[in-house]
Image (cartoon, coloured by chain):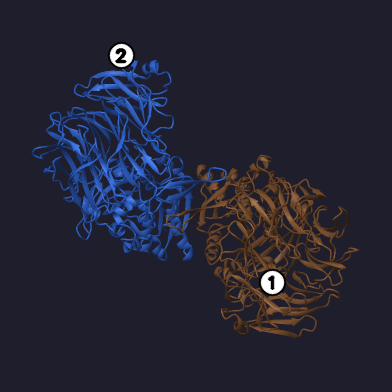
Chain colours: A blue, B brown
Amino acid sequence: MILCVSFILFQSVAQQKELTLEDSVLGYYKGLYPKSLSSLQWVKNTETYLQKTEEAYTITNAQTQQLVNTISLNELQQVFPQLTRLPYLKGITATQLRFTLNGGIVSYNYQSKKQGTSIFYADKAENIVLNDAASHIAYTLENNLYIATSSDKKIAVTTINDKNIVSGQTIHRSEFGISGGIFWSPKGNYLAFYQKDETNVSNYPLVDVTTYPATLKNVKYPMAGQGSEQAKIGIYNVATGNVSYLDIDTTDEHYLTNLTWSPDEKQLFLAEINRGQNHVWFNSYDVASGNKIKTLFEETEDTWAEPEHPATFLPNSTSDFLWFSERDGFMNLYHYTTDETLVKQLTNFNWVVQDILGFDAKGKHVIITGTGTDGREKHTFKINLKSGKSTQLTTVAGTHRTQLSSNGAYLIDSYSNISTPKISQIIRVKKGTKTELFKAENPLKGYKLGSSEFIDLKTKKGITLHARITKPANFDPSKKYPVLIYVYGGPHAQMVTNTWMAGASLWMPIFTANQDYIVFTLDNRGSKNRGFAFENVIHRNVGVHEIEDQLTGVDYLKSLPYVDANRIAVNGWSYGGFMSTSLMLRHPGVFTTAVAGGPVIDWKYYEVMYGERYMDTPQENPEGYKKAHVTNYIKNLEGKMLIIHGSVDPVVVPQHSMSLLQKSVKEGIQVDFFTYPMHEHNVRGRDRVHLMNKMLDYVVLNNK
Amino acid sequence: MILCVSFILFQSVAQQKELTLEDSVLGYYKGLYPKSLSSLQWVKNTETYLQKTEEAYTITNAQTQQLVNTISLNELQQVFPQLTRLPYLKGITATQLRFTLNGGIVSYNYQSKKQGTSIFYADKAENIVLNDAASHIAYTLENNLYIATSSDKKIAVTTINDKNIVSGQTIHRSEFGISGGIFWSPKGNYLAFYQKDETNVSNYPLVDVTTYPATLKNVKYPMAGQGSEQAKIGIYNVATGNVSYLDIDTTDEHYLTNLTWSPDEKQLFLAEINRGQNHVWFNSYDVASGNKIKTLFEETEDTWAEPEHPATFLPNSTSDFLWFSERDGFMNLYHYTTDETLVKQLTNFNWVVQDILGFDAKGKHVIITGTGTDGREKHTFKINLKSGKSTQLTTVAGTHRTQLSSNGAYLIDSYSNISTPKISQIIRVKKGTKTELFKAENPLKGYKLGSSEFIDLKTKKGITLHARITKPANFDPSKKYPVLIYVYGGPHAQMVTNTWMAGASLWMPIFTANQDYIVFTLDNRGSKNRGFAFENVIHRNVGVHEIEDQLTGVDYLKSLPYVDANRIAVNGWSYGGFMSTSLMLRHPGVFTTAVAGGPVIDWKYYEVMYGERYMDTPQENPEGYKKAHVTNYIKNLEGKMLIIHGSVDPVVVPQHSMSLLQKSVKEGIQVDFFTYPMHEHNVRGRDRVHLMNKMLDYVVLNNK
């Protein structure tokens, strides 16, 4: 194990003002998070950007930094007297602002100072998606899909009574990059939509205890190995009003993902994945007939294949597109054509490409985001479409969130890193030159707080693991400190990032300062942004490598002269609850205390889409499920363990914790439990103060 | 407050063998409870009694004490080779034993050594009631009522598909003395049965977490102030097979209770009670027509009227009967005739008559049980039907459970008291002479255990309250002991009784001994066996007088030099959970610790029948409900409070605890909670060991 302390970045020396756990929860309202420019965004098809001040929207020229327009609340109120504050914008062009008002999306022409086109939808509308080209809004009401037009027509796209059939909403539990079920075509002539048939999906009974008497609140929940949903793609033709469906047989419960319109609206592309999730077919369909045209390519993996990005067509092309794939071990871009040709692998990074923002002004470069060589960071690059040459546009180490102007000439870049609360700047894509717009003050200056550092550890196999250690204020290396390990550990997530406070939650420096504690977090194998091999080692065997890596972290902590090796506690939520309970029970004697929230206890109670990707079905992988089943280790408990669950958790259902409690009772093992009534997969809002106090009081009381 | 220590009865001096809480739960199997004669009962229509030994039933003459018969397992196995042990008996006559075997009630003639009449019912039959005269069995399957005959016919008495309509089962949630829904007529020609229509009763959603996935387990639960059940009385005519119903309109949801057949089978009597439970009509109905004949008498009460005993006809009379009523402040017997005449108040005790066992050999005396002058005791008396003269047949102080022989000449008496584990004897009703059959050894001899004493306290108003104090082994009055108050406090129950260990549960002397604790229990006003005025003080105002009396107990404890007044904890279940939480929250600073199991938190979540008797409806008594609502006091919490609930508690539904947790989270108050998965209104079986450890560990940890 090689140890490499990066560098101390977030310093806080002896200061007097103390913060509380309540401050950590309500920190946003208390000004404890770095300030940023509000609503900062490009004005569509211009080189100007908008931001929001107290009383007005301002529009500024990116090149000259000259103020171009000011639209005050006062001005808006002349046309919309209902407004009491500046509205949250749904879009901004060179002439119009769009925002939600009174059950519609209204627009305001700030050049003519008049109301523009407005479209009103139904009162309880959800999943509202505007089609700019057609001046239509698609939305859902309960399980059906509707359209509202600017001429105030309401059109029912689907009229299905059976509540098991749901149109226009996200499907596949929002895995595979899916975030919604409404897909307007590029020119606005069609609306493609997802439809799922949940007839074969079980109900999970949750209970609303706020009614008199309590009432049932069923949620559809497909458990691993059980009946799943069957997806369909519907197409609504705006001109004819006809609804048709693509001809796809999904009785095998395979997945329809990453829907992509061809730029000419004649074809739809889908990444179809078998339920086993190790085979992808990238298929094209004829919009007019609904028939499959062909399979452009296939991908198979021994572990799993997980496309999460639609195809991106090159500028002004209806044939050439870019495709994300992890087939070489890292997420890279591949240039395909619709005639089934792989033109080339465009990028060949041994780090993770994350997203495509667009193309530069001349269409010669694609602008992408990715980690760069440090998986804890996020940067923006331009990639020459011909040569594949890569130029990094964001240069300062850290996590850059960028927006590309419509013409591809400018980026708005807002970034932070371990020592920088927030900086916003304009970057010129061509030359890479920058103009700073904003630099945030350190909002925590003057408070007594712990400080966070990066740590790199190496596993026995030489794999680098990133970790973060938060030491108390007035840290004294000659003392012995107790440790709380905060863990998540599951895929799709990363706890240690080069962002403000190194990704630490605000409670960490507060807790370390107030209790003279060390808080430690390590991203084990299986976690995000380190490539496919780093992640897929967990396949069919969750818990094993993750625990091994966390214990590498424990060994490191125990090697530190200032750590009290007999006082180490562990805490986590969700996958982190699985990790906390597993660490506590499968390695008794290492931890005095575990606090697990919403823990996965038995993977067969988790959902089909996420669960089977990593574990296959319980029928296919009985050994893996058995080995990961936390209740099997309950008899090992040494020390104290608190389990917490939201009473109406629809993600990790309460059955997980209940099954652990039942086994603990049967085995005569005393564990502690608390449930947060009417909370879901976490405890949000003000109630979170109670949760933080409960968890950390428990750690302090028992980690002795 | 006057203090009166009764006398120390259960002595346990310095002994070595320690018992554990597990021993207290599994004590029956470990021989820690007093032995008794097994299956001791009268042989019907004889002066002989039966008992069960290891390998045989024996029948003994009560007068001569001579063994009359021995029926061995071996002998039974000649006829019933399936038997592996002596069966549990369903009846015994001079010639036959009856017992359940292979889905039927079979009989064995021990004179002829042959199988007698047997009747077989359906596999999943419940509520099985034998009609001896007609050789029929009535039983229920799901919501319908059936009959099986000795000629192996199965008759469906009701065939109702609607599961909201339930026939042949207990109604009114087994209040008003109801324990079943099947009433064969005296000569066996008719079957009267209860039918309830629960259409207007809400479902309470409970969740079975042992299925994959969890499944809904609805129970019908009528909450106070909400829709209740509508009852009916059906009559099945054995000769004709016809089913008819009494003509009673119950759309007002009034109660049909204490069904009584006239000895000639021509009339049915019912105590009908309004839903408000303060008015009783004792009505007679014509069996042939179903029409009401008349109201024999009415009773009204300002608080509540609660008949719990059917009428008892005098021997060989079809006109004269005895009726239980609390109308003079204590439960006494009244002699009525069917022509609406109150002949006389037969008993005039200022203590509680509890039951009628029958009549003596000449029919001149009724044999009753009641407390006698000490409410903690239970005795048997004969009352001269003409003069009302009372003779106490059980003379030793204590709790006597007696059975009367068919001819009324003999009693089997099994009793215990604070210093007597168990004695069984024969009592001759005429002369009162006794023959001892059995005397149990002290099963706790040689163990290190606390000892229990009676305490009498007086309230400021001069009312005597009975209490019990359990002191540790090797009690040293110069020490300061912490105290755990164990409380129930609700109506229909009594914790302090003159029985073995003074009614203490076995965990109490074990806990006091092992932890050097004092355990204290007091029966406050509202509790059983002290008369109507003592009980009905709680009307519309539960919690107030009960708490006042418990605090009288606390004051007494604090006055004791050997009590550490700063270390008093409280624990209770159900009504005792209501009391524990109320005491903790409404009198902060008195208790360091409360542990409440299955607590009533908000009386509007409790059931109609029990709840409205004491509290009226939430609409009628909003102030009373508000005052008793535990969550209203959560902000007062000082010290530690653990709430425990069975996850499928169908009596005090989980909503109670959940509402308290929700309020505690909202108010930022930390309480502790545990739920026992798949346990109902208590934790039974081996899992109870876990519960006892959880509760008492919590007390020991926090009562400091």
Q: Closer to the observer: label 1 or label 2?
A: 2
Residue B184, image quadrant:
bottom right
Residue B682 drawn at (x, y percent):
58, 59
Task: Check if mark 1 and mark 2 are on a common chain.
Answer: no
Identify the subunit bearing mark 1. B
Q: Which residue is mark 2?
A: A112
> B638 or A656: nearer the eye?
A656
Residue B80 drawn at (x, y percent):
59, 80
Name the side, left or right, on which A517 lies relative to A669: left
Residue at the image position 44 percent from the left and 51 percent from the top: A645
Q: Which residue is mark 1?
A: B10
**The N terminus of chain B lies in quadrant:** bottom right
Amino acid type at mark 1: Phe
Identify the subunit bearing mark 2. A
Residue A425, image quadrant:
top left
Residue B568, image quadrant:
bottom right
Cβ–Cβ below 8 Å for labels 1 and 2? no
Q: Is residue B512 above or below residue A41?
A: below
Asked if residue B324 can be seen in this view, the reply is: yes
